[in-house]
Image (cartoon, grey):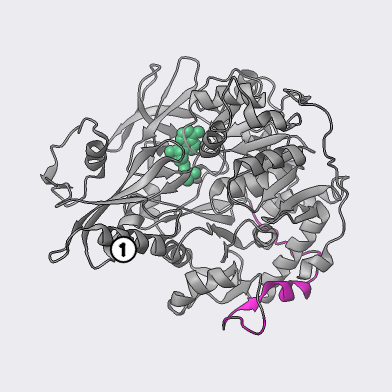
Amino acid sequence: MAWQTIQKPVHNPFQRPTEAHQPVAAQPPPALADYAATRATFHWDQARAALHGLPDGGLNIAFEALDAHLDTDRADQLALRWLGRDGQVRDFSYRQLAALASRFAHLLQRLGVAPGERVFSLLGRVPELYVTALGTLKAGRVFSPLFSAFGPEPVRARMEIGDARVLVTTESYYRRKVAPWRAELPGLAHVLLIDRDGDTAPDGTLSLAELLADCPDTGGLTATRPDDMALLHFTSGTTGRPKGAVHVHEAVVVHRLTARYALDLHPGDVFWCTADPGWVTGTSYGIIAPLVIGASLIVDEAELDPTRWLGILQDQQVTVWYTAPTAIRMLMKLATRDERGIFADYDLSRLRFLASVGEPLNPEGVVWGRDVLGLPFHDNWWQTETGGIMIANYRSAPIKPGSMGRPLPGVEAAIVRHTAGAVEVITAPNNAGELALRPGWPSMFRGYLNEPERYRKCFVDGWYLTGDLAQCDADGYFWFLGRADDMIKSSGHLIGPFEVESALMEHPAVAEAAAIGIPEPTAGEIVKALVALKPGFAWDEALQRALLAHARKRLGPAVAPRVIDVRDNLPKTRSGKIMRRLLRARELGLPEGDTSTLESDER
Ligand code: AMP
């Protein structure tokens, strides 16, 4: 591969630890020392000023992440260590990663990809993914990551909506998930394979390694403006197809600030974000934020495996760890708060800060972290549309287990009630309502690609409505209560019921389908589908298995329902909308709530 020859050995700053376990590592001073004082005087211009920037007010995420370090003593420090599934290790210094990103940026120019056009990746956590992301941003083209566990349907929908011009992937993913429908996406001009074998490669593909080897390893930077589109992150809706949230280069202001304030990242930290870059957390905090700060980023190719993870935390001497409740719940199965079990065999003394995001973190998880890992987890909250962390528990402030924390300095959050066109802010503490944010933070999404109406509907009366239900206590801490809509959160992944239902409806036996989230102890929720059959089809185990297989093949394991059951009829409103909420309440034996709009019922 091209970059095996480009790569030079990197000084390894890590040694295997020999000391006995110490509960808490030495801490640098907190990046956010006084929440109230900082919040009182904060202005976004201060956060902007902390970035390097480009001449004439330009700003480029990849420049901030890589090139800005090149004239400092960080240039030859470890930027990214990749741990392969089978034990391989590859190290990239800031200088090497900057050079690879330059090659990729030149490649896009040579291929005739215009500024603002979309470069998609469909890759596992391999080095090429990181080079694609950073090279695309450096070139001023738009990076859009796809989760590799998506099946052909979610991949196709997102590439169509995003108007993909380039795809970087593997031969196997290409053959299974893209080749069958590629002819219907004529705008997709280039498919670059990271493992292309000249003898057997599919038609219409190019070898990424060969092309990169031929490109210069300096330059390639496009002097983007803060408002130029940089990232396209897909998120699901309860109705309609997925939405492509548009993010601009200025988002890096929030990436940097939150890396400091919410994750307490300092230059030289060894940082591990376990989220996959196929989702927004894995890009904002699994690529951009730690590099901007000058930390060393750990990337693990393998899937979640608790003992492997403990080995990584120990051997890589991770200092700051950002993970998710599903993973924490899996680790919690290995040890109780009183009995450290397998954890006693690992030296985790370098860990100094733990954070969690993506789904509700139970108070037990926070306390378990403190007792077993020596540190509590700091829960924080954000979503694809916000582009970065908005609400957090900070290192210097008391944690309230079960709370998402308080708004970032510069962010105004409120609990609101809204009726047609008007928002009422609920100021009395501990009242439930919808979580809303005052627009204006730099990483706010700037649109849903080509869907201005859907975007407009997110803003009412000067507030951005998040779709989450929450409440705020007298100390200003926010507490998550649930979604205000029918979205499903499974293993931290936001899944839109509509996408699941559409795939099921393609099956000849299915007349109607509804997808709902059902609580599950480890994943938080799993997807359950309820279907009504067309005349002439009878429900039996064979049909159930066939439907499960159909859904898995179309949607991939990350989105497909885990359980499918049958109903004679699904409850609908007078306008014909399936009442997923009612179905869910019935499944869980909860009160059915308001059924006044019910037109036809399942029973
Ligand atoms: P996504 O856009 O895929 O990142 O999903 C965002 C959604 O995940 C939020 O709107 C919440 O519903 C949920 N979420 C994120 N962080 C938290 C958290 N700390 N606690 C509870 N739910 C969360």
Q: Nearer the viewer, residue 387 or 453?
A: 387
In-image side of 298 versus 520 (left or right) = right
Q: Which residue, as the protein is rendered here, is positioned at the far top?
A: 474
| Disc 1 residue crowd, few under 14, some 14–19, many 20+, Cα 10 Å | few
Where does the image place residue 77, in percent across and percent down from the top left? 84, 47
- Amino acid under disc 1: Ala
Where does the image place residue 344, in percent across and percent down from the top left? 69, 28
State the residue at coordinates (35%, 64%): 550
Magenta part of the chain: 198-225
In-image side of 441 versus 58 (left or right) = left
State the residue at coordinates (62%, 63%): 141
Q: Is residue 475 visible?
A: yes
State the residue at coordinates (49%, 76%): 179
Does residue 241 show up magenta in the picture?
no
Q: Nearer the viewer, residue 98 or 536?
A: 536
Where does the image place residue 167, in percent across and percent down from the top left? 57, 69
Q: Nearer the viewer, residue 450 or 422?
A: 450
- Our reading of the magenta stretch's main secondary structure is loop
Q: Is residue 42 visible?
A: no
Residue 273 vertical placement versus 263 (above, below): below
Where does the image place residue 538, in percent across and percent down from the top left? 17, 61
State the residue at coordinates (12%, 64%): 535
Does residue 200 show up magenta in the picture?
yes
| Residue to which mark 1 is pinned | 546
Q: Quadrant of residue 107?
A: bottom right
Q: Quadrant of residue 37?
A: top right
Quadrant, the N terminus? bottom right
Quadrant, the C terminus? top left
